[in-house]
Amino acid sequence: MLTFLLTANLIQAQDIGSILAKGEETGAFWSVSVRSADGVLLESYNADRFIIPASNQKLFTTAAILDGLGGDYRFTTKIYAHGNIQDSVLIGDLIIEGSGDPSISGIFYDEDREFVFRSFANQLMQAGIKSIQGKIIADITRFDDQILPKGWDWEDLSFYYGVEINPLSFNNNAVDLTVTAKGEIGGKPIIEWWPYNTDYVTFYNRQHIVDGSRSYDEDYLKYLGKNEYHLGSDLPQGYIEEEAFAVSDAHLYFIHSFDLYLKRQGFKTTSEFDVIKPNSDHTKEEWKEVAAHTSVPVADMVIWTNMESDNFYTEMLLKALAAEKKGVPATFDGGLSEVRKFLGSIEVDTTSINMKDGSGMAGGNFTKTSVLSHMLVKMQNHPEFDTYFKSMSVAGIDGTIAHRMKGTPLYNNFRGKSGYIGGVRTLSGYFETADGTRLIVSLAANNFIGKVRPIDAIHEEILMYLYQNY
């Protein structure tokens, strides 16, 4: 308690300029914008200089998604039979029509990653299908064939945060690997992966078990355009490592995994697959709907997106927005134009926003902290603000800032969105000061080298100063 009082008194005795002068010692470029709830600019430091927003970009994108789709919007993924059903046998093809639903995973189903597959299988049985003599076909005509946003770094494309964007997606378009360093020093650790140790992917296990006193040394690489992965890590004896890797041709991953699931449930299939691609000449006249799954509301997805800073959900919802507003096949550019259109409609300065993607991971994204804080002010009057506000992480409680601001008055008070890419750390959101006044802030540090902890400390020192002085 004494330490906290001394810290509070120290912060109260200085001003924001002196805090930021200390911040300059990190080598970072700093930008700060602070507004009252009604939009009055209270503090400004390089607020009209361009910064890289990192995942604070998601604040623009998710606001537009809530406006354009609405929090009640739900995706429906349908399965059709093309052929005749005789004696529980489909003499023909099974077509799975991708809706753009990002949530065919376990996230909203108590971590039951087979929930949707189980529902589909039960409906197929109810439709009288236990055997499929034709192909399982992926219909991916809802999105165009650009699977990654412009500007994503190829080094990110091995991992869960750089996965493909595809209208037919399963398990966040990633395969989940578990490595267990069980065995003798010098031996290879045991590897297992989900779903079902599928042969859709190939792991080259070149890892080694090392002495337990050594630290874990990670070495993973996905071969570009292939579902082949180099594993070269050194793992201390007894160590367990879990990693989620991006897959290529995510729609084929979906139908391959679904085929494996059906066989595990006693269905018979030919394990032959095909794809209906965007702009293809096809008709649904002879298709019969035999199964369907309707997702949770987009409101729930936006809460997950911002809370966990999920790039995959952001870009999937962005393309879904384009599909609804501009038609199919949906494009990334179409989604981004809808974001800009929405921001302009609430009087946000779009000339100060350059967006290459929706999630903030791409190179070439620029905006200003003054623009971010202004947008947060404007969102307070939006019909979807309750969901938008709920999507913010709560300091010390959940999401990407669950570990921050504990032991301060900002704990369970500050609600916001953090952002990080190499050399960039951002934080924007809402909180109440000591006298109950709501403040809206956007803080950015760009172009620094090293760890984020010193940057976070200065961000939080700024917030504490504001808490005490407004």
Image (cartoon, rainbow, N blue to C red):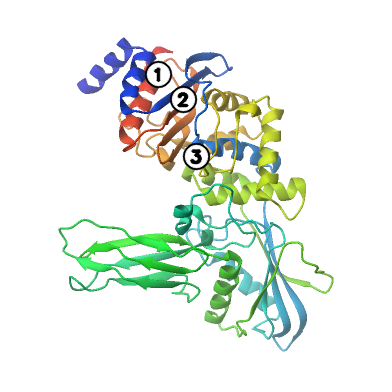
Query: For the residue carrying disc 3, how many other residues have a C-alpha within 10 Å: few (<14), some (14-19), or many (20+)?
Result: many
- Say which residue appears at 50% left-offset and 34% top-offset: 53
Q: Position of residue 216 (x, y in %)?
A: 25, 57
Q: Is residue 188 left or right of residue 388?
A: left
User: x, y percentage for residue 446?
Assistant: 42, 31
Q: How far is disc 3 from disc 1 in space, using C-alphas? A: 24 Å
Does residue 260 sit above or below 245 in this rendering?
Answer: below
Badge 1 marks a residue whose secondary structure is helix
Residue nearer the viewer, 314 or 279: 279
> In this rendering, would 287 be left or right of 242?
right
User: Residue 398: in sight, yes or no?
Assistant: no
Label 2 crowding class (10 Å Cα cut-off): few <14, some 14-19, many 20+? Answer: many
Q: Which residue is mark 1?
A: 467
**Toward which corner of the image does residue 128 lie, by quadrant?**
bottom right
Q: Earlier in the sequence, mark 2 or mark 1?
A: 2
Q: Position of residue 234 (x, y in %)?
A: 25, 63
Q: Which residue is mark 2?
A: 431
- How far is mark 2 from mark 1, CA to CA? 8 Å
Query: Which residue bears the numbered disc 3?
Result: 55
Q: Residue at x 58, y 23 (%)?
A: 374
Amino acid at circle 1: Tyr
Labelled pair 2, 1 in contact (Cβ < 8 Å): yes
Amino acid at the residue labelled 2: Phe
